[in-house]
Amino acid sequence: MNKIRVLIVDDHPFFREGLRRVIVTEGDLEVVGEASDGEEAIEWVDRLRPDVVVMDVNLPRINGLEATRRIKDVHPEVGVVILTAYDDEEQVYHAVRAGASAYHSKDVTPQELVRTIRHVRAGRYVLRQVVLSTEQELGRWLRDRYRQFGGDVLADERHLAPLSSREMEVLRLMVAGMSNKEIAYRLGISHQTVKNHVTAILNKLGVADRTQATVYALRHGWIPLRSSDQCQT
């Protein structure tokens, strides 16, 4: 059986050692490296190709969320577990948008952390003890928080969207939970035109359905939050 390869990222040597001791006692897990800041984390992922990164948020040079975003941009197959002293729902939301698959406070039990690493390796998401088994479940979770929390599109990513301005309008309304019929009414265009736009969006993003498009848009910071388009009729 291939072991799950884990990279530990934390700027406190004592905490890293504690994580290492927890992980190496499990027969199906192994620690392949340690990093003390965000830039090191990115470099070690490039070199070691771990399956899962256990990442602190407050790191020197590059914080854990920015390091997560950069890692996921290049290595989308690598799972990231965020560990932090700050345990609130909005921070979980921003971690997921950055690309994390799991989020725990640092008082997580060793058993729970080990289970989370296994869940993430299996493609699941663990958000404050809640396990989401599918991307559809993650999409619903993201949409709920999209309506609840604020934030802005990341300025340096806005130009990377391959969508036209009209397609971005349609995508924004998709994220807000509108059906094709509702989008057509809202934008004053035909139902077939909306279907064409949705098809183009899915093709350009390389995703299979509306839920995956929603997850992609929110995790890449393309959709402005607290938008005037949200949930209006």
Image (cartoon, grey):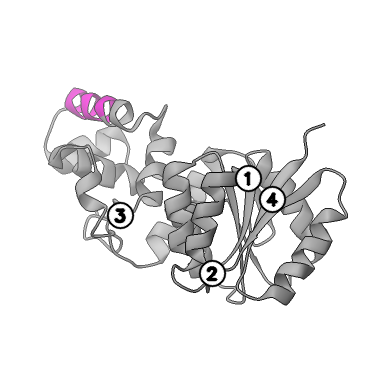
State the image coordinates of residue 82 (x, y, percent, origin top left): 59, 61
| Main SS, magenta residues | helix
Q: Amino acid at mark 1?
A: Pro
Asked which secondary structure carries label 3, the reply is loop
Q: Which mark sits nearer the N-terminus, 3 or 2?
A: 2
**First to last magenta residue range:** 191-200
In the rendered image, residue 220, in percent from the top left (x then y), is placed at 36, 49
Q: Which numbered disc, 1 or 4, marks the residue that appears first in the sequence? A: 4
Q: Are the residues flagged by discs 1 and 4 in contact, CB closer than 8 Å? A: yes
**Residue type (three-letter) at the residue carrying disc 2:** Val
User: Could you say where residue 43 lies in the image, as x and y percent from the top left?
Assistant: 50, 53
Q: Earlier in the sequence, mark 4 or mark 3?
A: 4
Q: Are marks 4 and 2 in contact (CB under 8 Å)?
A: no
Chain-order first, disc 2 or disc 1: 1
Q: Nearer the viewer, mark 4 or mark 2?
A: 4
SS label for mark 1: loop
Viewer-closest of 217 and 71: 71
Residue at image x 24%, y 57%?
156
Residue 6, disc:
4
- The residue wearing badge 1 is 50
**Circle 3 is placed at which residue position?**
231
- Which mark identifies residue 57? 2
Question: Who's the residue at 86% across and 50% down the image?
Answer: 26
Indicate left or right for 14 with 78 as reference.
right
Alpha carbon distance from label 2 to label 1: 19 Å
Secondary structure of the residue carrying numbered label 4: strand
